[in-house]
Image (cartoon, rainbow, N blue to C red):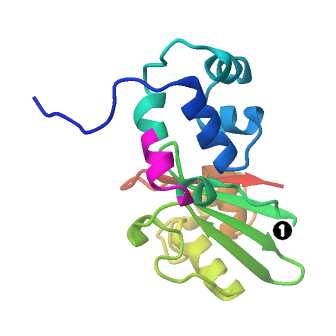
Amino acid sequence: MKKYVVSDTVQGWEIRAARQRLQLTQAEFAELVHMSKKTIERWESGIKEVTGPIVPLLHLINEYPQLEEEMILPEKKYPLRLWYMERNHIRTVIDVDERLRKVKIYNYTHDRIKRAFGREEHPSYQDYETFLESRCFPRSRDKMKLILKDLNLPFYDPFMIIEKTEGRMAEDDFWIRIER
């Protein structure tokens, strides 16, 4: 059996200190660690040692405080937001202004293969259009009109196809959630 160099318990004052170091309210810290605000209040005010998943998580937060910053979801910049997902994990958030043809992305994985635009950090609107099309069946597909009819679409439009199919492909676990 493997042994880890993480304590089995933490004290309430350690949780408070980590939260304050991150400059988070109890409610914000509760959201970060997926606990209730009441639990955070109880832990911080208690004298009893705290056990459970918060212990290794607190260790990671203390050792790598930039993790909190890397997980923040920025305010929506443009009218359209797409969430590029792998199963239930957010990999890339894409903000789009279709009228001005602008795109801003936020990656939530270091694995470039799992990012919507790979190593590209500042995709163009054309890159965005290419990405959308990559999440659809090809324009040249046999019997495309039948597929479009099944989707109740009048013509081939990658965004409309993704609205209907979530950009799901048979061969992978990636999909797209659209937020307006």
Residue found 78% across the figure and 71% down from its top: 96
64 part of magenta stretch: yes
Question: Dividing the image into 4 quarters, which one contains the C terminus?
Answer: bottom right
Q: Quadrant of residue 47?
A: top right
Which residue, given by chain and number where applicable, does mark 1 sit on? 77
Residue found 72% across the figure and 17% down from its top: 38
Q: Is residue 172 visible?
A: yes
Residue found 62% across the figure and 14% down from its top: 46
Q: Nearer the viewer, residue 155 or 134?
A: 134
- Crowd class of label 1 (few under 14; some 14 to 19; many from 20; radius 10 Å): some
Q: Is residue 122 left or right of residue 111?
A: right
Badge 1 element: loop
Residue found 59% across the figure and 29% down from its top: 13
143 part of magenta stretch: no
> Which secondary structure type mostly characterizes the magenta part of the structure?
helix
Q: Is residue 62 above or below residue 6?
A: below
At label 1, which amino acid type do we have? Lys
Question: Dividing the image into 4 quarters, which one contains the N terminus?
Answer: top left
- Residue extending furthest toward the left: 1
Residue 126 percent coordinates (x, y)? 67, 87
Q: Is residue 150 visible?
A: no
Please report the bounds of the magenta region as a residue range: 59-66
